[in-house]
Image (tube, grey):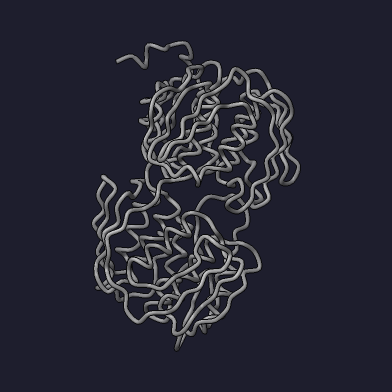
Amino acid sequence: MERFHIIGGKPLTGRVTIGGAKNAAVAIMPAALLADEPCIIDNLPYIDDVICLSNILEEVGAKVKLSNRGVAQIDGTSLRDYKAPFDMVKRLRASYYLLGVLLGKFGKAEIPLPGGCDIGARPIDQHIKGFRALGADVKIEHGIVKAEAKKLIGNEIYLDLVSVGATINIMLTAVRAEGTTTIVNAAKEPHVVDVANFLNSMGANVKGAGTDVIRIKGVERMNGCEYTIIPDQIEAGTFMMAAAATRGDVIVEDVIPKHLESITAKLLEMGAQVIEGDDYVRVRGTDRLRRVNIKTLPYPGFPTDLQQPISVLCSIAKGTSVINESLFDHRFRHAEELRRMGANIKVEDRIAIIEGVEKLSGTLVTATDLRAGAALIIAGLIAEGATEVENIHYVDRGYEKIENKLSGLGAQIRRLKDGETLLKRVNSHSLFKG
């Protein structure tokens, strides 16, 4: 397994460009299969999840040309199979969007229960509720979700809880159903809006995305299109927090500041300076951050995907911070790793109580999931001495060449090969020269 070697203590300075939104990309790519012509998707992040998903689409019969420059051409006209391969789907939770797509396109779909990071229970009961409301018979047999409908008919669907995945999946099926579908208590995240905009670019009729009521009028045919994915709200937030944590001064470019309002609000509350432009935010750190209380909530609340990174800031802030993780059960697994670095964190159920310390110390830590990996990288950037982060394949799932972007801001970080370690040479800063 590769790992990151980081020597901390240097403020990040400069500019960093944010890539396309991972959570939008992994829904828009399968959505392209609904079209009766090829689609070209731009601003795709070249990350492991996107590469894995492109392979899954090819396995079900689509033609995919994926460039490492962030462009993909997806042609679903040759698609004939309504089943997805088990060994690939189990690696990627977003593969469940194929359920909605294949059900809408063929009237039937068979998809293994999806995998992804272990951050707690993420049932698909609301997805199934939506499919059934549209006329599908859905059952789970031996770990495979099987859905079939003689005819898809629009209906009103009330989600018992706000679910991004269920909202998008129901949209993907409803665009090809007869009549009008109304999703009540829909998710409002930016990538939900982006998927709706993409579907409309293909000729769908989706209205209300970004509000809690979405109405979809089914269409018989969908055309190809060219579409550019929105910037990644979570990647932007990660770099904003890294700038504040290291007492740096970073301009985070190619973003939509409105999508970052909950993050900006908490950084301001902690004493950092945030300046917004049309398509950028500038974050300046402070000598000592202040305590803060946070509760993760669906958009426009504070995103659960940034709870772990901001917990690092809380670990060095003055005073005691409280983080309430209201969405997932296992999103504090990184706390034990931060404690190894000297953080003072107590976790009770979904609540973390963090008493700030003056400094963290570098050591060997292990990423337990994607966003935990980002958090440990930030911890390494502010720690005294050297830190090595294992299991960075999690990080590669959601961040494109994060070490290169951080190095461009002055961070001392490098990727080590399998089995390689520099941790015994903590004081050897010369390793990063040249």
In which quadrant is the C terminus drawn? top left
Q: Quadrant of residue 335?
A: top right
- Between 201 and 138, the residue placed more toward the observer is 201
Indicate the quadrant where residue 24 lies.
Answer: bottom left
Taking the image as shown, residue 75 lies to the left or right of residue 283, namely left
Judging depth in this view, the residue of 359 and 391 nearest the camera is: 359
Look at 65% across and 52% down and name the residue there: 327
Extreme-front residue of the structure: 278
Residue drawn at point x = 68 percent, y = 21 percent? 357
Q: Nearer the viewer, residue 423 or 291?
A: 291
- Residue 193 in the figure: left or right of residue 201: right
Residue at 56% across, 61% down: 187
- Which residue lies most toward the bottom here? 150
Rendered residue at 37%/77% (across/down): 105
Location of residue 181 in the rendering, given as x and y in whole percent from the top left corner: 51, 78
Q: Is 230 located above or below residue 320 in the figure?
A: below
Q: In this rendering, would 393 be left or right of 270?
A: left
- In this picture, is 379 found above or below 324? above
At which x and y percent is residue 8?
Answer: 50, 19
Q: How many marks?
A: 0
Q: Is residue 297 above or below residue 200?
A: above
- The spot of residue 243 in percent (x, y) is 50, 27
The image position of residue 63, as x and y in percent, is: 24, 64
**In the rendered view of the protein, which quadrant contains the N terminus?**
top left
Residue most toward the right? 348
In this rendering, the answer to whether 218 lies above or below 151 is above
